[in-house]
Each structure stands twice: as structure tokens, then as C-alpha cells.
Amino acid sequence: MKEKKIKNNILTIMKKECSRIFSDKRLFFTAVVMPGLLIGVMYFLMGNLMGQMFEVTDDYIYEVNAVDMPDSVRGLLPPELGINIIDIERSKAEETRQRIENRDTDLLVVFPPDFDALVKDYEVTSTAPAPNIEVWSNSARSESAAAQSLVTGILGAYHYSLAHKFSVNAPSEDAEQGDYELATDADIFAMVLGFMIPMMLIMFLYSGCMSLAPESIAGEKERGTLGGMLVTPTKRSDMAFAKIFSISIFGLMSAVVSMAAMILSLPSMMQMDVSMADFYSVKEYALLFVVVATTALVFVSLLSLLSAYAKSVKEATAYANPILLVVVLCGLASTILGGVPSQIYYYLIPVFNSALCITSVINFEANALNIALTAGVNVLFALICAGALAKMFNSEKIVFDK
């Protein structure tokens, strides 16, 4: 009988808890549905956008700079394939290689003089090296990588049709190991970081702020201590600013610690014996700090408003969770736009502008005006929210609503 009674008690409590969760639609959605929904949407977007990073639009015209390209090969690369052949002098080859390294053009194809005659006279059984075609590219630029794949594929088919009477990208004076890749370690490092760092850093920053802001305001409201603070002579606006700035400091500290851990582990993940310190100077770190610090103000000020409106920490957290999806999308700003835009209006959107600036710093393309505008917009947004928070503190209905 005793065992049966215990079982009945367990079932009764279970039913009560299940009934409470199912009857609270908001709690059920945030606790059961929201985590899976956020993860599904986030990975769907990341998967699609990751693919777009290495894709080229169908209407893109590849710039193929050619030295001594014979008509026999030119006919294999018609404009219908989206290729624009730019004939250059051999003396301009080094300059063009530099342009490819700087990601200003797509491809350089260098033929030996009198290529057709050399191919005709070459004997496959000969021990002499076959006429070599050099195809220079930069894999850190998706258009260059795509152009390289297209052109070398066509040249490879032509190579087989001529019974291997020439070679493509064989070792030469300029590329002793046959390496015609002009992307540096810094380019590859920046390409990977440019996708990962903005999203991860902004997510870490938001998570750190989200763990602090609800407890600081909604928590005190729930415990009844907020009302006691507001009856002191301290101005409501001063209290609002103090709350926002103090939480921002700890949110920023949380993001910095998480960021440091990620940076230290990146070389192992990328299997590269390098670190950010090898490529980035104090200037880049300072610019990142300015952007991240002002972004922390945006997150804390927004979360503080939600916390002041909420009746409890649990409710404040429920309000904050859906914003995480928007934060993730903002972190992917440069990927969504296909690069870092120059238009000023993009930098008037809080958080979105931060992600663009972080990407520009990582890619060595930082623009002082855009970063200054981003910092100004973020601070202005935080000040507006602080003013709104002060007004909410003036409302007894909001302060004492539990």
C-alpha cells in the first residue's frame, strides 16, 4: 500500500508539473520549441551561406589576363563561358601577379612564345620538359578560384587531346614546386576568420550580456530590491546609465575571454602553425575593441529594457531568446551581402554595422569612417535606450509589477 501511495504521489506531481508547462504557452514555446527552432534555423542559414561564400554569381565575367595566348586556345575560352580575355605584355606579368595577390583581378595565364609551334615539334618520348602553361590564381578570392578551376579544366581536356604534348603549372623559375597559388597565409587566415569571427564574437557578446542583464534588473524587481533603490535621491537616469555601463563591462569581459579561447584554438582547428598575432597589429585589435565595446552597450541597453518590462528573470530570458536569431543573422552580415559594402546606410543599423566592421578589420579592409559611424550609432542607440529605461523606472506600474 505504501509503495502504491508513493507511486500515486509521483504521478500526481508529474501531472501537475506537466499541466503547468503545457498550460503556459509561452513557457512551453521557449523551453521546448525555441531551442530546436533556433538551432535548426541557425544551421540552415550557416550551411547555405557557407556555400555562397565560395560560389560566384551566374552573370559574373571572369577577368583572364593572358600572355601570348594562341588562337588555338583562345577558341576554347569563348565569352559565352563568362570569360573576358585581357591580352597583356610579358613585361606586365609580374605586375598582374601582384594584382591577383591583392585580389584586384582573377587570373593570369602565361604561355611560352610560339606555343603552337613548340607543341607541334615536341616529342612525348623526349626527356626535355614539355611547353608549360602557367595559371596564376588566388584561392582567397572566390572568383579567382572559380576562374582557375574553369580554365585549368579546359586546358586539361586540351592537354589530353594533344597526347600530353604540353603541361599546365609544371615547376618553373617563378614557381619551383609548381605552386601558382598567390594567396598568402594571411589571406587564407582572414578568409576563414572573416566568416567565423563576426558571428561567434557577437554571439558570445550577446550571451554574456543576456546572462547578466535579466538578473540585474528583472532579478532585483522580482526580489523587491529595485523599488527600494528607486526611492533614494539618485536620479532615475543616473541609475539607468549606471546599470547599463556596469553590465556592459562584465558582458565585454565575458566576450573577450570567449574570444581569446577561440583565437588560441583556431590554429589547431585550421591546422595552420599561425595565430592572429602573426598578421594583426595593435591597430586592428584597438579597432575591434571599439566596435565590440559599443556593441556591448547596444545589447545591454536593449536587454535592460526587456528586463525592466518583464516580471521575472525567467520572463526576461524568454523575451531575450528570440533576439538571438536576429543576432546570428547580423553576425553573418558580410556573407549575406557577399562582402563588406561601402554604402553608408548599412552602418546605421546597430549590431549589423558591428558585424560588417569586424569583418572589414579581419580582412585588412578597415575603414575609419565606417567604424567611427558604427561606434557613434551604437552609442546613440544605447543612450536612447537608457533614456527609455529611466522613464520606465519612473513608472510604478512597471517597477512594482510582479
Image: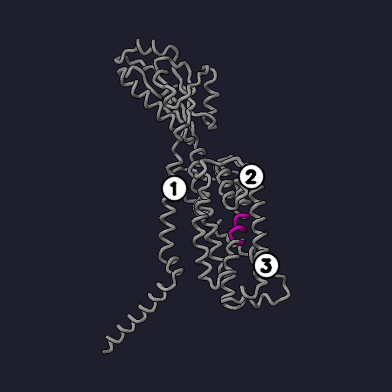
Q: Earlier in the sequence, mark 2 or mark 1?
A: 1
Name the residue at 30% across, 83% down. 7
Is the residue 275 above or below the residue 40 in the image?
above
Name the residue at 56% across, 66% down. 212
The N terminus, quarter of image: bottom left
Pair 2/1: label in front:
2
Q: Which mark is residue 105?
A: none
Tell me the quarter of the picture where residue 177 sits. top left
Find residue 158 and report its horizontal and vertical position in percent. 34, 20
Instruction: Give left or right: position of 161 versus 336.
Output: left
Disc 1 target residue? 268
Q: Earlier in the sequence, mark 2 or mark 3?
A: 2
Seen as rendered, the residue at the extreme left is 1
Q: Disc 3 to disc 1, how far (Cα)?
A: 47 Å
Q: Disc 2 to disc 1, how far (Cα)?
A: 33 Å
Q: Amino acid at mark 3?
A: Ala
Seen as rendered, the residue at the extreme bottom is 1
Specify how the rendered protein is coloured: one colour
Mark 2, other Cα within 10 Å: few <14 / some 14–19 / many ≥20: many
Pair 3/1: label in front:
3
Pair 2/3: label in front:
3
Is the residue 364 above or below the residue 169 in the image?
below
Q: Earlier in the sequence, mark 3 or mark 1?
A: 1
Find residue 227 and report its horizontal and vertical position in percent. 64, 77
Q: Which mark is residue 390?
A: 3
Find residue 92 and report its horizontal and vertical position in percent. 54, 20
Element under label 1? helix
Name the residue at 54% across, 28% down. 99
Q: Which residues are magenta?
A: 294-301
Q: Disc 2 to disc 3, how far (Cα)?
A: 30 Å
Instruction: Give left or right: position of 54 versus 224.
Output: left
Disc 2 target residue? 370
